Image: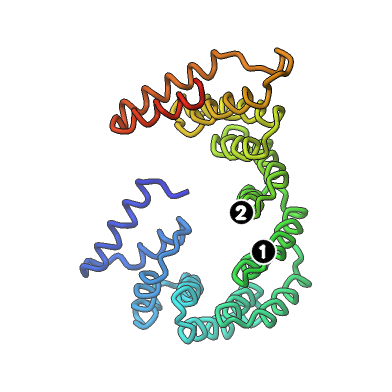
Amino acid sequence: MVSKTEETQLNRLEIQVDNGGGGAWEYLCLARKLKVRRPEKVLKYGLSILNDSKKRSALGPEEWTLYEQVAIAAMDCQCLDVAKDCIKVLRKKFPESKRVGRLEGMLLEAKGLWGEAEKAYSSLLEDNPLDQVIHKRRVAMAKAQGNISAAIEWLNKYLEIFMADHDAWRELAEIYVSLQMYKQAAFCYEELILSQPTVPLYHLAYADVLYTLGGVENLQTAKKYYASTIDLTGGKNTRALLGICLCTSAIGQVSKGRNKEDKESPELQSLAAKALEKDYKERADDKHGLLTCVLRSLKI
């Protein structure tokens, strides 16, 4: 994730280059380091260097890295002729490169030649079955075609090999949620919490999924994970505070007529409601009345 300081530095460099103050190469290096995709600027600044023989030769070995960066930016901007030219230069320099092969596959994707791109990726995977980038390209290609079931299949196959990829687990969870496959999404968030137990976002997302699934057991577990989110954020997560109140109300409705053991003690929801009211008074006082009505409707 890009920090505010890094984003400010990148924006400052962008303004500097646009105003003729130089720094195009520094901007391109920083954009690459931060993995930020600003294709229009990267294409513009990159071509200004590549089209100048003196500037290009001054880069040394980094010249080829720039060709790759510009090729990807050109594909993002649908400047496919520029991308083709950059890839052609790279292929001439590195005739046996699998990395250039990936770029050629991406160019086929950009042209909408899905079948040919799949053949190219399959061929590359035969040589190196552990190429993460190509596995991810397959997922991206399936999503681009609107084939969500294939994207799920490729992601599951990818995670069988690269089980520690948190971004892939999160992407799979979000796809499952979009398809209302909440049990499968819950499993993904469980994997994320096991591997990164101090990330509040995963606790919150897991609690949301469990709340959506419903049932006393799921609601009680959701409430615990909303509470852990509050703990991990120092009590400053409004969504989790409201989640506590919603879970308490839902458990009360589901537990009507059941044993006392199924019912919730009022302390936690009372604290959550007070924290919510304080938060709204400080940050959105004009909506405090609305919050009061909502809490009243939940009988809190």
| Neighbours of disc 2 within 10 Å: few (<14), some (14-19), many (20+) | few
Q: Quadrant of residue 31?
A: bottom left
Please tell me which of labels 1 and 2 falls first in the chain: 1
* Residue shown at the point (45%, 31%) measured from the top left: 238
Residue situated in front as seen by the camera: 231 or 221 = 221
Give x and y (percent) for residue 286.
Answer: 28, 32
Q: Is 7 left, or right, of 115 in this rendering?
A: left
Residue situated in front as seen by the camera: 232 or 129 = 232
Q: Which mark is residue 8?
A: none
Give x and y (percent) for residue 170.
Answer: 62, 49
Give x and y (percent) for residue 151.
Answer: 68, 63
Q: Is 203 left, or right, of 150 in this rendering?
A: left
* Residue shown at the point (69%, 50%) measured from the top left: 181
* Residue shown at the point (72%, 49%) measured from the top left: 163
What residue does disc 2 label? 178
What residue does disc 1 label? 148
The amino acid sitting under disc 1 is: Ile
Give above or below for 32 relative to 285.
Answer: below
**Mark 1 vs 2: CB contact within 8 A:** yes
| Neighbours of disc 1 within 10 Å: few (<14), some (14-19), many (20+) | some
Q: Secondary structure at mark 2?
A: helix
- Is residue 250 something one can see in this rendering? yes
